[in-house]
Image (cartoon, rainbow, N blue to C red):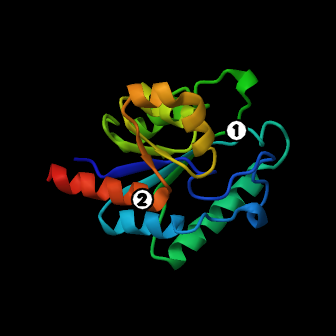
Amino acid sequence: MTKLVILDRDGVINQDSKHHIRSPEEWIPLPGSLEAIAHLNHFGFKVVVVTNQSGIERGLFSLEQLNAIHQKMRQALDRVGGQIDGIFFCPHTAARNCQCRKPKPGLMLEISDRLSIELKNIPVVGDSIRDLQSAWAVKANGILVKTGNGLSTIAEHSAELLQHQVKICSNLTEAAEYIISSARCEI
């Protein structure tokens, strides 16, 4: 079994904002999220982040600012013994109709290509339906957290979540425990 976990960023790892996370100062980790990533790492999981960052194309922040946000995230993870093995992002708005913007699977396919792995049944943790749809497109295992947009996703897409038998967790800590216990069952 490939020990990989794919995480959305905003609303899963850190607080989300309707106005985008534009600077390192605005990047605030959700309680327990960094420790959950470190816990996954401790059990041998590589963790990668997949995130839509249309604020770049909108001119709300630069690529340099995005890199600074991600540097802050990596440093915060390092302090708790965790790490992110890769960050894949789409800088485009929905109007661009690109293949890399979730819910399309372009970034997932890029991960598969770069890491030379099949994503079937790989856990993908997100807080919105588009996170799950991009996972389903590559036959990955979508897991929804109630943080960020999670509660509104449940309210608006309950039938689709039920149809796909989506595991719903309170937060990334609970999702990490579920992923680790599921991996133990497969051994």
Drawn side of residue 182 relative to residue 122, left or right: left
User: As drawn, which residue projects farthest toward the left?
Assistant: 187
Which residue is nearer to you in this view: 142 or 86?
Answer: 142
Element assignment for label 2: helix
Disc 2 marks a residue whose amino acid type is Glu
Query: Disc 1 marks which residue?
Result: 91
**Percent coordinates x, y for residue 93 in the rendering:** 74, 30
Q: Is residue 133 left or right of residue 46?
A: right
Q: Which mark is residue 128?
A: none
Nearest the viewer among 96 and 144 is: 144
Q: Is residue 121 toward the left or the right of residue 133 in the image? A: left
Q: Which residue is rendered at x = 30% and y = 58% of the image?
A: 180
In front of the other: 2 or 113: 2
Q: Position of residue 5 (x, y in %)?
A: 40, 50
| Residue 159 seen from this side | yes
* Residue assigned mark 2: 174
Tag 1: residue type?
A: Pro
